Every structure is written in structure tokens, then in C-alpha cells.
Amino acid sequence: MSITSVNSATTKTDASTSLAKLSENYTAFLKLLTAQLQNQDPLKPMDTKDFTQQLVQFAGVEQSISTNKNLENLIKLQQAGQAAQATSYIGRTVQALGDTQEKATSGVTTWSYKLEGDTAKTDVFIFNSSGNLVYQGSGNTKAGEHDFAWDGKDQNGITMPAGEYTLRISAKDAANANVKTMTTVNLAVTGVEFAEDGPRLVSGKTQIYMDDIVRVKSANPFVA
């Protein structure tokens, strides 16, 4: 399961489409103005006021085209900067918003979760990629951020296979009301995928946006 986020950014396609429309309007305006000048009655030349208004419109369209081209250049520079920044994460472990990450064949898988307040009871649930519950336990009851390390075994002590697993937190206060929680995953960044909506950091089958990163934790010793 990939971690996704919503980004409101102008894409290269949108900018190109806008520029093409402006260019069409610009060309059509020139043809219309030229035709008016060629076919005007010499005895009744074009009114100066109307002609001035058309020149103002002409200048406005020309300025819009120039602005759009400059905007495209700024977008390209921004995308290049994002790409350079994204590649700098390769070989590092990051903490990012999300609840699903890959478990290796052996070893411990860690998540972090934040409690907005103290709880009377905190339950921790882990589900496999099919949505089946494989582990249930107790979590911390104090407000703040906490780490949870899972040894990869189910309730019967059987080691679960490698794959994607999801952490869910259920937190209740003394009045049995829900306490707000936030879950993050720890990912070893092994690559970058470039897409129209921006670069995504890759860790196994999981992809995240840089906007989802809350902390860069350490260098990853397992990546050359």
C-alpha cells in the first residue's frame, strides 16, 4: 500500500495547455487587427479610441504569453530542485506519516504513534495485506510520541511472512471517548520515482511524498 498525499501544484501539462490557448488568441488577434486595417474605409478611418483599446488588448495577450513562459521556467526549476532534494534521501531512514510498511523476513519492524492526551487504555493492532488481524497488544497510555516494535510474530508466536503490514491504534480516555492519534512509519529510502505530481521516495513497494516526512532519522547502513 502506498502512502499518498494531495498536492495543489500547476503541472507542466496545464501550463503548456494555457500557453497554447494564449498563443492561439494572440495569432487570431493579429489576423483580425490586420484585416481591419487593410479593409477600413479611407474616408472613415478606424476610430482612434477603438484602435487604442485593441492595442491595449494586444499588449495584454502578449504579456500573458510572456508570463506563462516565465511560469513554466520557474516550474522546471522547482521540479529540478525537488528532484535533487529527493535523491539526497537515498540511503537514509525517514519517519513519515502513514501506517503501512514492509516487514522483512526476520528482525523487528517499528512504527511510532502519537497520543494527543493520556488514555485509560491503548490497544495496538497489526493487520496483514489481506486485512486479517495477526497481532493485538497494549500500548502506552501517556500523551506524546511512542515507538512500537513488533517482532514479526502473531498471537501464537508464529513468525509472519515478509510483506506489508498495517498498524492501527485504538485509544480511549477514562470516559471511554476516543483520543486522537497519529501514526508514522520508518522507511529506508532505496530510490526515487519521478512522476507528474512530484518525486516520490521509494522503500520496497512503499512510496511516499517528501511532504509526508516528519523526521530524517539516520543513514541506512544496509544501502551501499
Image (cartoon, rainbow, N blue to C red):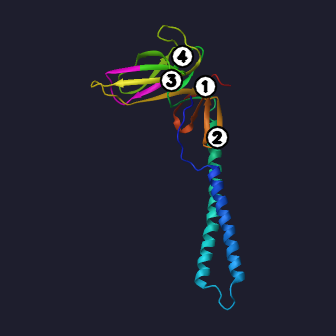
Residue at left offset 69%, top offset 89%: 42
Q: Position of residue 197 (x, y in %)?
A: 60, 43
Q: Position of residue 118 (x, y in %)?
A: 33, 26
Which amino acid, by three-letter code, is at mark 2? Ala
According to the image, label 2 marks what residue?
195
Residue at left offset 65%, top offset 60%: 21
Q: CA distance from mark 4 to mark 2?
A: 32 Å
Q: CA distance from mark 2 to mark 3?
A: 25 Å
According to the image, label 1 marks what residue?
220
- Dot 1 falls on a residue whose secondary structure is loop
Which amino acid, by three-letter code, is at mark 4? Val
Which amino acid, by three-letter code, is at mark 1? Asn
According to the image, label 4 marks what residue?
108
Residue 189 sits above or below residue 135 on the image: below
Q: Earlier in the sequence, mark 3 or mark 4?
A: 4
Label 4 Cα crowd, 10 Å radius (few <14 / some 14-19 / many 20+): few
Q: Is residue 122 magenta?
A: yes
Looking at the rendered image, the disc whose residue lies closer to the viewer, 4 or 2, is 2
Residue at left offset 47%, top offset 15%: 135
Range of magenta residues: 111-123
117 left or right of 38?
Answer: left
According to the image, label 3 marks what residue?
166
Q: CA distance from mark 1 to mark 4?
A: 15 Å
The furthest residue to the left: 175
Q: Earlier in the sequence, mark 2 or mark 3?
A: 3
Circle 3/circle 1 CB separation < 8 Å:
no
Q: Is residue 188 magenta?
A: no
Q: Nearer the viewer, residue 151 or 195?
A: 195
Q: Main secondary structure of the magenta part?
A: strand
